[in-house]
Image (cartoon, helix red, strand yellow):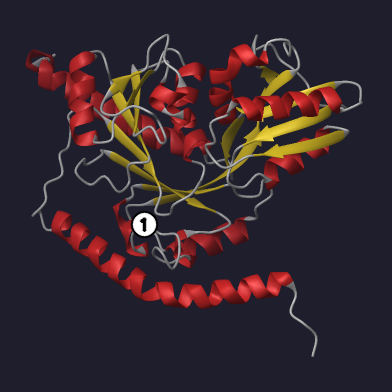
Amino acid sequence: MKSMSSRNVLYYIFSVVRIFLYPLALLYGAVVWLRNRLYDTGFFSSIEFSVPVISVGNLSVGGTGKTPHVEYLIRLLLYQFQVATMSRGYKRRTQGFLLAAADTNALQIGDEPMQYHLKFPEVVVSVAEERITGIPTLLQKRHDINVVILDDAYQHRSVKPGLNILITDYSRPFYQDFILPYGRLRESRKAYHRADIIIVSKCPSNLSREEAREMEQHIHPLPTQKVFFSTIEYDQPYDFFTQEPLSLEERSVILVCCIARPEPLVSYVKSLAKNVHVLSYPDHHYFLTKDIEEIREAYDNWQVSDKLIVTTEKDATRLHLQREKLKGLEGNICVLPIKVRILFEEDQVLRGKVLSFVEKAAAEHRTSYFPGQAEG
């Protein structure tokens, strides 16, 4: 009998371990069901704010592409409204409510909020573990806020958003997943009922309408829900120090990344660069001195021309903490941003739904503060 390959052995061990996780998933699922039931019946209260609140979240742990979708909303609303974002600030070294300021860094507010802060200086970026107290504090400090975007708040039921957007990954949609720890879902599949808009993210750019319709049938949206499909696109690369445009084409690239699934990024960079060397770190990794030394050593020892260090926008927010140690590499560090594109020419439909909600809610918010305007 042939011996099992190491991959088969690992798969067998994982399958056995997963069976023992099933009872824990049943217990966890029961606790989450009870919590949701208490909210649904009104035993636990959900607060709805007069200012428009949009929640962007998911049912699963791990990245589904929330950050570029939040940026999509920021771009949509930025020039008509004073936009604020609120995140919990994953892996930040601070606690409580905090507003981003000119001297704020990723250690204080987390890498994703820092990305919003660097990319959209006009936006009010805030972090708070408890949104129920964070939103009133935000509105007290900034009376000019017209709309609040909550990042990763789908399970924060103490706040009732006016518009609830659920993101699910094309490669692992929620209807094929299971509750923790047997699967990756934070709550049961039926929790999608709370969403107003469902976006299937990270789709292939050439996704067929037939496959999209099939996925929509599996999702089984309610009559009040609309399903959209989005794909990730890479935007114009720029210099880490000066923000000037750069090109990856025909360059020898050292790719520095700290993301959960780097394969699509690696594949894209390889499609442009002539050589690619990958330095991969854990997701949300904060760079230490030894990491910067490793990056410098890889750069100095690679005997090729047109060398370029490339990293993602999220990773760049943490590299900024080591900015002084990166001196001497000016012009040789490139940031590669991403953005989302809505498929099947439905971008205007999604924009219309979001703008319609915000405009109506913002008008009602103004009227509640200035009742005489209702007669105008």
| Of residues 298 and 111, the one drawn nearer to the viewer in this rendering | 298
Q: Residue at x 32, y 35 (%)?
A: 54
Is any part of residue 170 visible from this angle? yes
Quadrant of the drawing holding the N terminus: bottom right
Residue 314 occupies quadrant: top right
Q: Position of residue 15 (x, y in %)?
A: 55, 75
* Residue at 18% in and 61% down: 37
Identify which residue, 364 or 36, lies in the foreground: 36
Residue at x 85%, y 26% (from the top left corner) = 301
Q: Quadrant of residue 94?
A: top left
Q: Residue at x 33, y 50 (%)?
A: 195
As displayed, is residue 19 above or below residue 104?
A: below
Q: Which residue is mark 1?
A: 186
Residue 336 in view: no
Which of the two residues, 34 or 203, is positioned nearer the viewer here?
34
The correct choice, above or below, for 303 with respect to 82 in the image is below
Q: In this image, 139 relative to 170: left or right?
A: left
Q: Amino acid at mark 1?
A: Arg
Q: Position of residue 127 (x, y in %)?
A: 33, 27
* View extreme (front): residue: 290
